Image (cartoon, coloured by chain):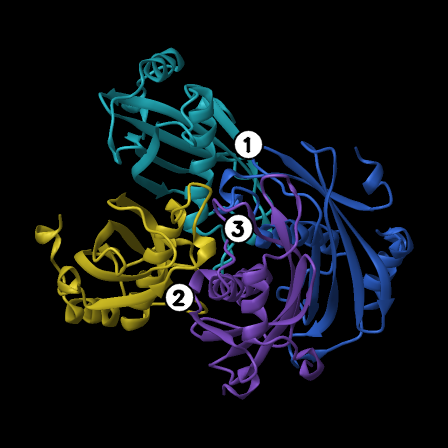
Chain colours: A blue, B purple, C yellow, D cyan
Amino acid sequence: MDAPLVAFPIIVEIPVRWGDMDAFGHVNNTVFFRFFESARIEYLRAIAFVGGGEAVGPILASTHCRFRRPVRFPDTVRVGARTTAVAEDRFTMEYRLVSLALGEVAAEGGGVVVSYDYGTARKAPLPAPVRERIVALGVGGAEDAA
Amino acid sequence: MDAPLVAFPIIVEIPVRWGDMDAFGHVNNTVFFRFFESARIEYLRAIAFVGGGEAVGPILASTHCRFRRPVRFPDTVRVGARTTAVAEDRFTMEYRLVSLALGEVAAEGGGVVVSYDYGTARKAPLPAPVRERIVALGVGGAEDAA
Amino acid sequence: MDAPLVAFPIIVEIPVRWGDMDAFGHVNNTVFFRFFESARIEYLRAIAFVGGGEAVGPILASTHCRFRRPVRFPDTVRVGARTTAVAEDRFTMEYRLVSLALGEVAAEGGGVVVSYDYGTARKAPLPAPVRERIVALGVGGAEDAA
Amino acid sequence: MDAPLVAFPIIVEIPVRWGDMDAFGHVNNTVFFRFFESARIEYLRAIAFVGGGEAVGPILASTHCRFRRPVRFPDTVRVGARTTAVAEDRFTMEYRLVSLALGEVAAEGGGVVVSYDYGTARKAPLPAPVRERIVALGVGGAEDAA
């Protein structure tokens, strides 16, 4: 069941909560972005780029999701996160979500994370150590995305 | 302030709730999709395509958002929704979100809504009256999107 | 329709979002606490007791809700907030929620807000100006609660 | 760490999501009710009283929470649920939430679940098999609640 996530350096496992479902009886579309966020936060912690009091931190510039299968409670999802491209002041992430109950990929998505100087309120180059840790975790993989 | 929304047939006004903000102190990314959802639901009601007990209803196949400006409480947002393309069994929507406090577009996005037969669990052609109502509300506009 | 809220110095009006509903098809119980929170935040702003960088701010010690009627989208709720008792380092609030679609009280609740010194991480006396503003808004009313 | 939950027949373990935190930087008060809901749903599944298409199902009549310690991401909470009293058409539940990171009880609460006939839209006696399963799981314990 983890084959779809084998290329993802960060994988988080998240139990679906009953309240994640909406009036259609399946997990609401906004919750998939919450799941992606959980994987992104874990990735950002892994590269020690978490913002907060620091001058330069991450900001989400865009994100998207393609819903392949409806997910329902009870279930547990595994969400993989990886970086597919790095630029001067940003990097592009890909997310893949596997439903353990369905045994298959239920959603795929991605996002662009920009390096932001909270002091000057402007984009800033990615700190060199952050970039190094991104590279160390592996960059690429978009070519095998569905 | 409504100039950016003048081409949108459906506009919903939504007060930001304090709890929409996350630990970064601005409206969480997932909430923008909730705002888009509110506009989409209003649009679906306007074209009388709301699913429920009916055999054929809408299902969200994909969605995306580009965040232009952080939004904070207190604020009220206006979200426009329109259709930019219609196909046999789906239509493509565009959303634009204006922050009244900022006086400008804070986010833009879109999504694909698929016509789904909940009885057979398969895609289905858009019901003719639904398609007519979509056309009546106006199709197009992507060319002037940012 | 505002008669039930006539004794409440703070009233917020909140449109129900479609996504506030859960798989039972009515507004989820947690969302009523979000509605109460919106009224509480407005009240705290009115008495200029909002925490943040300040040394002493509010912290919610307990809260409760009694659900009288299910609420569904589309609807708009009005939530009243008032203080029914003040002590050295805390005050007790009451909330009342009216559904405009139902034309009646749909939920009632309350909570205890404690004055907290975020510097020393201990309870602290309510700042005198805050207490004065609470008194100015009116204290009491529990006797006429249902 | 499980000592506080030893008397609870139902215990659910829930990882805190980063997005559960609010602008104060700790898990938002409404999320504690989501955690309680998750434990309640598990309890209702254990007694096979889950509503849905069935004529008689549960409805939450009231709920409350006392917040003892702020919870932050990253953390995992364990939530115990038990019934402390049963009446003709309702039962009273108690919830206790332990933060694994803090190693102590972070919140306590409870609620009243009413048996509701969705066909006639009225309260209804608890179905006998449901009552038997509640009794089998154990009723009582409020005396040792804090």
Using the numbered discs, state the Cα–Cα distance from disc 3 to disc 1 in whole angstroms: 15 Å
| Residue C115 to residue D16: above or below | below
Q: Is residue C103 left or right of residue A54?
A: left
Quadrant where the C terminus of chain D sits is top left
Instruction: Using the image as rendered, state which of residue C121 and residue D44 is in the foreground.
Output: D44
Q: Amino acid at mark 1?
A: Glu
Q: Are marks 3 and 2 on the same chain?
A: no
Q: Is residue D23 left or right of residue A27?
A: left
Q: Is residue C88 left or right of residue D15?
A: left
> Residue under circle 2?
C51
Instruction: Using the image as rendered, state which of residue A26 and residue D11 is in the foreground.
Output: A26
Using the numbered discs, state the Cα–Cα distance from disc 2 to disc 1 in whole angstroms: 32 Å
- Coordinates of residue B72 in the picture (x, y in percent): 50, 72
Give the residue drawn at x 47%, y 81%: B100
Q: Is disc 2 surrounded by few (<14), some (14 to 19) or many (20+) residues within 10 Å?
A: some
Q: Amino acid at mark 2?
A: Gly
